[in-house]
Image: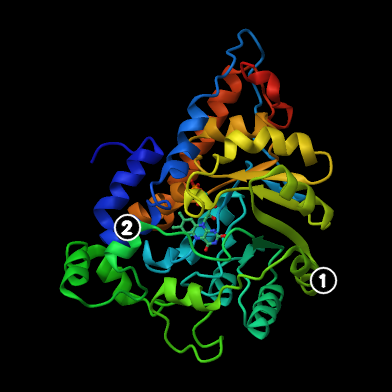
Amino acid sequence: MAKTLTIADLKLRAQRRVPKMFFDYADSGAWTESTYRANEDDFSKIKLRQRVLVDMTDRSLATEMIGEKVSMPVALSPTGLTGMQHADGEMLAAKAAEEFGVPFTLSTMSICSIEDVASVTSRPFWFQLYVMKDRDFVNNLIDRAKAAGCSALVLTLDLQILGQRHKDLRNGLSAPPKFTPKHIWQMATRPQWCLDMLRTKRRSFGNIVGHAKNVSDLSSLSSWTAEQFDPRLSWKDVEWIKERWGGKLILKGILDEEDAIAAANTGADAIIVSNHGGRQLDGALSSIAILPKIVDAVGDKIEVHLDGGIRSGQDVLKAIALGAKGTYIGRPFLYGLGADGKNGVTTALEIIRKEMDITMALCGKRLLTDVDRSILVQ
Ligand SMILES: Cc1cc2nc3c(=O)[nH]c(=O)nc-3n(C[C@H](O)[C@H](O)[C@H](O)COP(=O)(O)O)c2cc1C
């Protein structure tokens, strides 16, 4: 097999190993996917300044995100159905992140539950919350995350209703998968995935099934979200969630300066500039394009993070140079997971670390904490 050197290599390997409906679930954006593409494309428009004859010894990518030490400023994004990219996917990814020294964020819509992930990790992870109409269920989720020792709650703001992703509708995406001839074929052509999946009992939404009222089985993500996600969610709700949680709070899904100001006024600890990886409002700006404006508007009041389109260590560095204090990767770690389980997630993180380290040196910086707009061609 050819050497795996880039995130694109991991993507190809994942495509060969993961049944089509789940690979497509990761590799899709809303409608025309223009925002999904722009997230990646806009990074390549930003150019770096090459500097020479600067001492490049003793480099360090270490920094902090919301006061937590990280070996590099790259957390794993919350992603739904991660346990369908690879059996027990959330547990494997959380372990890889812990060993690497970066935060792992567990999605509400995960396959492995909060308790599953807590059982295999020793450092606190972060928990991402979707707010459902059933407030007893939401309160219970918050309490479960607290009981599991999660050190931050990531409240997602940009999915009160689900964006339309054509591939998922065409594929008839569900978890566990349906047994129609098409789905059986997609799985039969991925035998290793099937074997791993047969060995685990975790094949449905672990945080929900058995915890939410009247939900013993949950197959369709879109019908569940249509029924359960609360379209009335407002800034007022952030107050009671913050109070109930009582710990570090990160608001995810900010793409507008006015919303960034409102978010900073809630007293949250950080915001994530994000368009949900281009999966919600197609036609919205890329995350990296709006980042400088948001940093200018609220960067001195609240920690600003970014996700969307990061496919290399260079992309991370560009986001940091433009004022982000931390970044997140979604698909890059999912491709690693699909390609090779826990090792694949580690490979994704290593690829990004190496690219970031070499780029930082060639831009004339030794410490990530010294990186600022001066490394960019203005
Ligand atoms: C397959 C997939 C599932 C996702 N599920 C969630 C989720 O459950 N909750 C959430 O807040 N964001 C979710 N996201 C969005 C990610 O947290 C993140 O914003 C996005 O993936 C970042 O873009 P990137 O994939 O280009 O790195 C998901 C993204 C993907 C690709």
258 sits to left or right of 118: right
Q: Amino acid at mark 2?
A: Lys
141 sits to left or right of 222: right
In x, y percent, where is residue 124?
Answer: 67, 63
Image height check: is 60 above or below 265? Answer: above
Is residue 19 among what the camera can see?
A: yes
Q: Earlier in the sequence, mark 1 or mark 2?
A: 2
Quadrant showing the N terminus: top left
293 sits to left or right of 349: right
- Quick one: label 2, few (<14), some, or many (20+) residues within 10 Å? some
Residue at image location 54% in from the left, 78% down from the top: 228
In x, y percent, where is residue 298?
Answer: 79, 41
Quadrant showing the C terminus: top right
Q: Amino acid at mark 1?
A: Glu
In x, y percent, where is residue 142?
Answer: 69, 75
Residue at image location 37% in from the left, 61% down from the top: 85
Quadrant of res 125: bottom right
Residue 11 marker: none
Q: Circle 1 is placed at which residue position?
A: 243
Is residue 60 among what the camera can see?
A: no
Q: Circle 2 is placed at which residue position?
A: 167
Image height check: is 346 above or below 227? Answer: above
In x, y percent, where is residue 369?
Answer: 73, 32
Q: Residue furthest top?
A: 53
Residue at image location 22% in from the left, 78% down from the top: 179
Q: Secondary structure at mark 2?
A: helix
Image height check: is 257 above or below 129? Answer: above
* Mark 1 vs mark 2, CA separation in Å: 39 Å
Q: Secondary structure at mark 1?
A: helix
